[in-house]
Image (tube, rainbow, N blue to C red):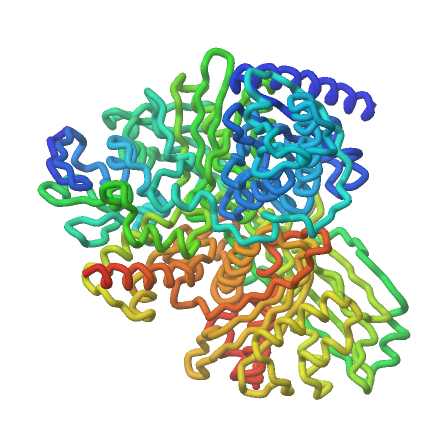
Amino acid sequence: MKRKEENIKEMNRDERFTLKRRSFMKMLGGGIFIFFRPWEALDLLSIPAEQARTLTKDYNTFLRIAEDGTVSCFTGKIEMGQGVITSLAQMMADELNVPYEKVKMVMGDTELCPYDQGTWGSLTTRQFGPFMRAAAAEAKGVLLDLASEHIGAPAQQLEVIDGIVIDTKDNRRKVSYGQLAKGKKLEKYLDVKPPVEDYKKFTIVGKPYKHSDAKLKVTGEAKYTGDLKLPGMVFARILRPPSHGAKMTSVDVSGAEKIEGVKVVRDGDFIAVVSENRDKADEAIVKINAEYSFDEMQVNDKTLKEWMLKTDSGTNVVRTGGDLTAGRQECDKIFEHEYQDPYLAHAPIETHTALAVIERDKVTVWASTQSPFGLQDSITGELGFPRENVRVITPFLGGGFGGKAPAQQGVEAARLAKMTGKPVMVVWTRDEEFFYDTFHPAGIIKLTSGIDKTGMIKFWDYNVYFSGTRGADAIYDIPNVKITSYSEKRNAPVHPFGTGAWRAPNNNTNTFARESQIDIMASAAGIDPLEFRLKNLKDEKMIDSLKAAAEKFGYVAGKAPSERGIGIACGTDAGSWVATIAEVKVSKNSGKVRVNRIACAQDMGLCVNPQGAQLQMEGCLSMGLGYTLAEEVKFEGGNIRDRNFDSYQIPRFSWIPKIDCVILDRKDQAPQGCGEPAIIAVGASVANAIYDATGARLFRMPFTPERVLEAINKV
Amino acid sequence: MEETIRFTLNGMETELVTDPNQTLLWVLRNQLGLTGTKYGCGIGFCGACTVLIDMEPVRSCMLPVSEVEGKSVITIEGLASNGELHPLQKAFIDHDALQCGYCTSGMILTAAGMLMKNPSPTRQEIIEGLEDNLCRCGAHNRIIDAVQTAANEMEGGK
């Protein structure tokens, strides 16, 4: 039965693709079109089954070479500040031998671009990149064949420089890609195998390129979703419940209806005001009086730990090795600790925004989303339109960090466009952004471990409750290991509101627990924390990364607490290795922590754009100070108490330390993720630095002045 | 009730018939098409909506448009002159001082206002001047460097 459904879905996809191809060919005009798809992609990519279905047979992306020689690359990925608009173009330019400036990225438009599951997990470069490069290499083969015909020389005698194909035997005989495309409407279909790379031949990949979209962004010309406007467009404000779990019992909209230029629309509990004047919509929405009944979970940010530990959970043993009991017997010292991490908001400066318009039987939605195709599916389901009549377009995003993987606002705008018959703009207020955010899930880690007399770790019993297993593995060479995850059961919900992926999902939490525990053991063994790590590691890449960070930092060995305020942490994320050393100053009077300096080394395989990678690392380290020092969503049941930047503090200029980054030279290796790894070790390195400064150990993030003081007072 | 409001917008005399209680932010964005000024938090905490009013950085999300009567408003679109980017805009590009770019307009205009008062700020003064403008991507250090570079260039031009 399941298989049959799959087949039907697949047929629909092929049909959809045919329709799509026809429509964009019409839209785009002439040139050479090269479609490609990953070869046996599913065998190669480890992606969740529910997302895998639509990846199978589609041609995954395509190129268009236009008459002016411009190469457009159409991809379902989106740009949210992470810089793939630049790095993907670099890869494309390199493979096709065209100037970088000639490559245009067309991103995140469900009508023009082939399916993509979504932009997250630092996957764009490491997963999508290799196929795109391989496709470009194949595309170059197609162009060389065309050029061979045009010039009258065998393809292997030709070379390409800056988009011009030249006969190596007679360099007067040449033709540009643009000339080859002239007057043509040519389609080529390629099945692409993952490439066997010769990394040495790159001329553009591996070189630093600044953001290609910077000029648009410093002049205000860059268009984000909220910057669009359509004739007759109205702004909508939607009536929101006061808390998650509240149900409307009565409502009186008459106050809002009295306001000039405002219309109230309603579909059951979905009530909104619309107006051409945004401020009027703001004024009207608060005039609606609604009553609610409350059936909320009896938990708040202060009682969370007890609540979590008493909630029933599903148990999943992630990894076992050796024998914990035997390992324990070999130990000289045993350490048992609990670590805690709160809910975090994504808090991008651009709130969730969408503009929807319905023309005849077709809906078009522009949305700030990390998942244009996911939103297309949601709208299809909600409106009951055929999928091919739902188009989602993704302009620039003002930050995502995982929070714009869900795109509820896009569905809301589409519903309202249908209800009002007008183009509708939904710009979530900051309050709505905090309320409907899919927060990083809070979690607890219970960790017991032990070392022998020589300082070798002999056992590691790691238990993570509710916050997920990314980065939960031990990474150290420990003979007796058990990693267990306790997760939310369907019939026993633990989180009182939505949770989701927050930059390097849950790896911050796991790295905090693991690396704090390592430090505790190093200190108890009387061994320098760097030496202790190196001694217990076999992973060469982790060792190299630690050494590189230590060198950059100018690390001098010393047993903690040394009163210098230096802390080390390391880990792996998104295929990359990262090591971080932080230096802090702690006020023993106020408990305030100031991070003065961070050095971070990252092994991310081939670095496509060292400039962009550097920015991502700096961004991770700066953003990471938030979860480390201040960020924690306060709530009471389903009521989110932090609703703006007054109480929910994110990093500010004065918080940011001097940052030094090292990217390890790994040109001969496949590229890995870069948008997330460097954030994972900020919390742990700062926790360890606080201990080194004060002898006070922090077991709960963030390290607010109150918590730091409390820990200092226990010393 | 609509009223006529006259002010100078990016150097141009502007006359606008509008609801005087509308915020400057939404008038700029929705009526005048100047969408470089961004909505971020709606109550002045983030700085994405910052514009210059009589050369002072002001949060446009909090300000009724009637308040700019007779004043000079500069938005990010009006910062370049004769097609030449403002030194701050150039420095932001040169230092790659942005990622998603959503806070950038507010950062640049806040910095522009600061440099008018204090043409050669120290690093610490730049930090203090930008402290209430939020950037979530973590471009802070590059923004500080960019402002420093622009300050040097602007001073050098005098």
Q: Position of residue B124 (x, y in %)?
A: 32, 71
Q: Position of residue A18 (x, y in %)?
A: 66, 16
Q: Position of residue A336 (x, y in %)?
A: 72, 75
Q: Position of residue B108 (x, y in %)?
A: 31, 52
Out of A680 and A320, give the one closest to the viewer.
Answer: A680
- Reply above or below: A90 against A65: below
| Total count of labels | 0
Res. A378 visible in picture: no
Quarter of the figure with residue A3: top right
Task: Give the residue displayed 66% in from the left and 28% down from the top.
Answer: A143
Task: Give the residue displayed 44% in from the left and 61% down from the top.
Answer: A651
Task: Give the residue displayed 56% in from the left and 44% down from the top.
Answer: A84
Q: Quadrant of the N terminus of chain A?
A: top right
Quarter of the figure with residue A128: top right
Query: Residue most toward the left?
Result: B70
Res. A32 visible in picture: yes
Out of A303 and A282, give the one closest to the viewer.
Answer: A282
